Image: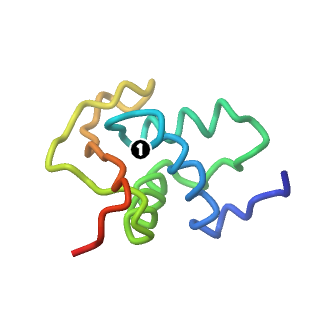
C-alpha cells in the first residue's frame, strides 16, 4: 500500500469504514487501536486529539454518525476520559 499522508485526514476514511463494518458501535479509541495494529499502513497522528477530527471528517463523508452516548476510554494513558460513541451510517442520507 502506498504511504498515507497523515495531514490528509480523508486518507483515514478507509480505516473508519473498516472499523464501522466490524463493530456496531465504536469510539475514536477503537479506530486508533486498529490503526496501531496495522503497523506501517497508517502513520501516527501528531496529537491524540486528532482521532476525533478523523471521525468528524468521516461523518462529513457519510461513513459514520455520532450517537448521543459517551463511554469511558479503555485506552491506556487516557485516564478513562469520556469518548463519544459512533455507528456506521449504513448508507443513510445526511439530513
Residue 34, percent from left and from top: 57, 34
Q: Residue at x 67, y 61 (%)?
A: 6
Q: Quadrant of the C terminus?
A: bottom left
The residue lying furthest to the left in this view is 68
- Asked if 3 appears above or below 22 in the picture, the reply is below
The residue lying furthest to the bottom in this view is 95
Q: Residue at x 75, y 45 (%)?
A: 41
Colour setup of the view: rainbow
- Asked if 73 appears above or below 43 in the picture, the reply is above
Q: Residue at x 45, y 67 (%)?
A: 57
Q: Residue at x 45, y 70 (%)?
A: 61
Identify the element where label 1 is drawn: helix
In the image, 12 versus 72, the foreground residue is 12
The residue lying furthest to the front in this view is 91
- Asked if 41 appears above or below 7 in the picture, the reply is above
Crowding around mark 1 (Cα neighbors within 10 Å: few <14, some 14 to 19, many 20+) is many
Does residue 32 appear to the left or right of 41 in the view shown? left
Residue 68, percent from left and from top: 14, 49
Does residue 55 appear to the left or right of 40 in the view shown? left
Residue 90, percent from left and from top: 36, 53
In the image, 30 versus 14, the foreground residue is 14
Does residue 74 appear to the left or right of 7 in the view shown? left
In the image, 1 versus 54, the foreground residue is 1
* Number of numbered discs on residues: 1
Residue 16, percent from left and from top: 51, 50
Q: Which residue is mark 1?
A: 28
Amino acid at each position: 500500500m502506498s504511504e498515507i499522508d497523515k495531514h490528509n485526514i480523508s486518507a483515514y476514511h478507509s480505516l473508519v469504514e473498516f472499523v464501522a463494518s466490524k463493530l456496531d458501535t465504536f469510539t475514536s479509541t477503537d479506530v486508533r487501536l486498529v490503526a496501531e495494529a496495522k503497523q506501517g499502513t497508517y502513520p501516527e497522528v501528531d496529537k491524540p486529539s486528532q482521532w476525533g477530527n478523523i471521525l468528524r471528517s468521516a461523518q462529513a463523508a457519510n461513513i459514520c454518525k455520532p450517537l448521543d452516548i459517551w463511554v469511558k476510554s479503555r485506552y491506556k494513558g487516557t485516564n478513562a476520559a469520556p469518548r463519544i460513541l459512533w455507528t456506521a451510517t449504513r448508507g443513510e442520507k445526511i439530513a
